[in-house]
Image (tube, grey):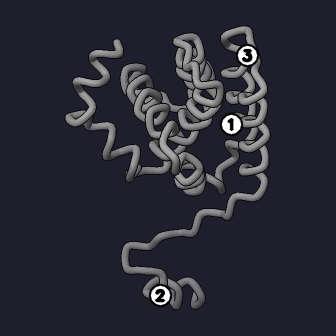
Amino acid sequence: MSDAKHSNKHSNPIEIEITEPSSLNEQAAVALVIVGALVAVADRQVSPVERDEVVRFIRDRKLAPHISDDRLYAMFDELAERLEEPDFANVVIDNLRPVSDLPLSSHLMELSERVAAADEDVRPHELQAIKLLRLLTLVLPRAKQVTPGGAGAQQPAAIQE
């Protein structure tokens, strides 16, 4: 699995979707995966059971039925790798901000706790990651609506209605 991940790193079509999700559904799936990946990476030992727990959680709740398990696993692997970089906090915030208006907070928090417990050893760094996520879900700035013609182009029409 690890070899396949590295050999497909540059040709992986998911990379574009993760950095620029094209729809709210994609963004929600990425937000769920990044939460699980953050907790999994927190103790520097990403376990396959943690990765499986992320996909199982998303599947059991039918939160991203349009995304295959293989794509979810690939998203997890790529995001876990990105979270090992120095700018990991920006990666988390940038992927949570677009869905901050959605009622995902309870799912995000439940998923983070399940990933921490998946390997039957909740470590202090995983607890810190969960606390960080709890704080982020409370204070993250709400997503701004983006309109095709720009913010100013649509505003007068909205005011007139």
Q: Name the residue: 39% across, 49% down.
A: 19
- Give left or right: position of 31 versus 148: right
Residue 146 is situated, as x and y percent measured from the top left of the image, at 47, 70
Badge 2 or badge 1: first in the primary sequence: 1
Position of 85 compared to 116: left or right?
left
Q: Residues within 10 Å of mark 3 (few under 14, many from 20)?
A: some
Q: Position of residue 121 (x, y in %)?
A: 74, 12
Q: Is residue 97 above or below residue 39?
A: below
| Residue on which disc 2 sits | 152
At label 2, which amino acid type do we have? Gly
Pointer 3 residue: 117
Secondary-structure class at tag 3: helix
Q: Label 1: which residue?
A: 108
Instruction: Please identify, in this view, whether the residue under mark 3 or under mark 1 is nearer the observer.
Output: 3
Report helix, strand or loop for mark 1. Answer: helix
Crowd rating for badge 2 (residues with CA inside 10 Å; few <14, some 14–19, many 20+): few
